[in-house]
Image: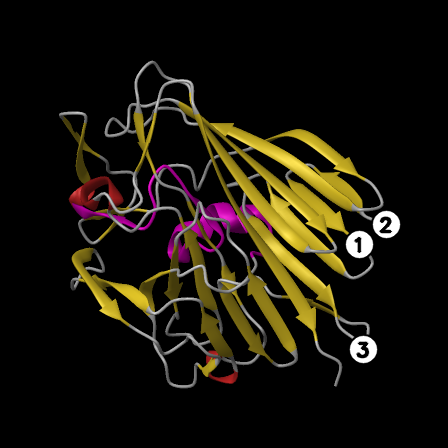
């Protein structure tokens, strides 16, 4: 039996062996826990202590941040769309705009349901058009669904304006399996990654990279790369270690996978992206969403605990 519980600014989905905690602040996934064979619970998401902690510190690492209407870096915060130039500037890494405009929005619960098969919630936020560099009104609805298949997250963006809008979507979760990154192994359904310049903006090249086509240790490995998914295997990515396995199943709406290993070596960011970094300029995965139309993006996280 699946259950759900609402606690002011937190939403809790649960089954006997899985639990998920969602914050209305940012619409972010704060906890995704599995009951291990010894009965203890383990959270695979690098969590905030409280919603207030998230409000105060999200922009330090953008842990679990919702990336919309653009993802990762936007070169110098500038782009042109339908013949007009724009300049975004909400948050910058060096001189580049980064991580979109919705990561710190307060979402509202619009639907919830639980039964024997699943528990799900839908939350929504409207873009306030408070960045002059992105004057396009839209709504963002996120559905979290916990079931025996894991946790699925579906995002729906609806263009509420009278003209087309540029769009990319993504997530910025950080995962942990306990211990350090050196204890874990990674497999990615990809043989290619985007070439980056010194500012981690795509430079137009595609680089062969087969290191993770089979399960490979992360010991001593540093990553800050965007992989092009091949869609040749059921799972786009598998992270394993310490008796735990996380498998990620994005649908075709997320063709890129950004991987980042922080210097702390205790977590790894695995980011589903619908478009490449700077896609407003390079066009890699850029969506032109017409007035009144919707675009949907979905991924699923499955965790398993191995018996000793």
Residue 276 placed where, x, y %?
30, 51
Residue at 62%, 46% in the rendered image: 22
Residue at 36%, 78% in the rendered image: 211
Labels 2 and 3: the sequence-earlier one:
2
- Decide: marks 2, 1 in contact (CB < 8 A)? yes
Stretch in magenta: 48-75
According to the picture, the residue beneath numbered tag 3 turns out to be 38
Q: Which of label 2 and label 3 is nearer to you?
A: 2
According to the picture, the residue beneath numbered tag 1 turns out to be 15
Q: Choose between 220 and 297: the one closer to the eye.
A: 297
Report which quarter residue 91 is drawn in.
top left
Is 61 in the magenta? Answer: yes
Q: Choose between 300 and 94: the one closer to the eye.
A: 300
Label 3 SS:
loop
Q: Quick check: 302 left or right of 250?
A: right
Residue at 25%, 45% in the rendered image: 279
Residue found farthest to the front: 232
Q: Quick check: 128 left or right of 50?
A: left
């Amino acid at each position: 039996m699946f259950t759900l519980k609402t606690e002011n600014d937190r939403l809790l989905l649960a089954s006997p062996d899985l639990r998920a905690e969602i914050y209305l602040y940012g619409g972010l996934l704060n906890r995704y826990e599995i009951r291990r064979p010894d009965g203890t619970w383990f959270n695979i998401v690098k969590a905030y202590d409280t919603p207030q902690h998230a409000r105060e510190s999200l922009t330090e690492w953008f842990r679990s941040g919702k990336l919309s209407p653009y993802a990762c870096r936007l070169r110098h915060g500038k782009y042109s769309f339908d013949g007009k130039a724009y300049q975004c500037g909400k948050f910058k890494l060096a001189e580049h705009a980064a991580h979109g405009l919705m990561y710190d929005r307060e979402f509202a619960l619009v639907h919830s349901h639980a039964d024997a098969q699943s528990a799900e919630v839908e939350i929504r936020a409207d873009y306030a058009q408070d960045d002059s560099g992105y004057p396009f009104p839209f709504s963002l609805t996120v559905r979290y669904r916990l079931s025996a298949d894991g946790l699925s997250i579906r995002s729906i963006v609806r263009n509420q304006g009278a003209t087309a809008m540029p769009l990319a979507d993504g997530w910025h979760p950080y995962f942990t399996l306990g211990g350090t990154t050196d204890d874990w192994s990674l497999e990615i359904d990809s043989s290619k990654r985007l070439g980056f310049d010194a500012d981690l903006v795509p430079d137009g090249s595609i680089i062969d990279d087969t290191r993770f086509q089979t399960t490979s240790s992360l010991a001593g490995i540093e990553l800050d790369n965007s992989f092009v998914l091949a869609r040749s295997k059921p799972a786009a990515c598998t992270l394993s270690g310490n008796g735990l396995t996380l498998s990620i199943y994005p649908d075709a709406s997320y063709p890129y996978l950004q991987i980042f290993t922080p210097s702390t070596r205790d977590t790894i960011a695995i980011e589903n992206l619908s478009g490449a970094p700077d896609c407003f300029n390079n066009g890699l995965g850029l969506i032109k969403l017409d007035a009144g139309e919707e675009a949907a993006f979905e991924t699923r996280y499955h965790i398993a605990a191995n018996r000793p």
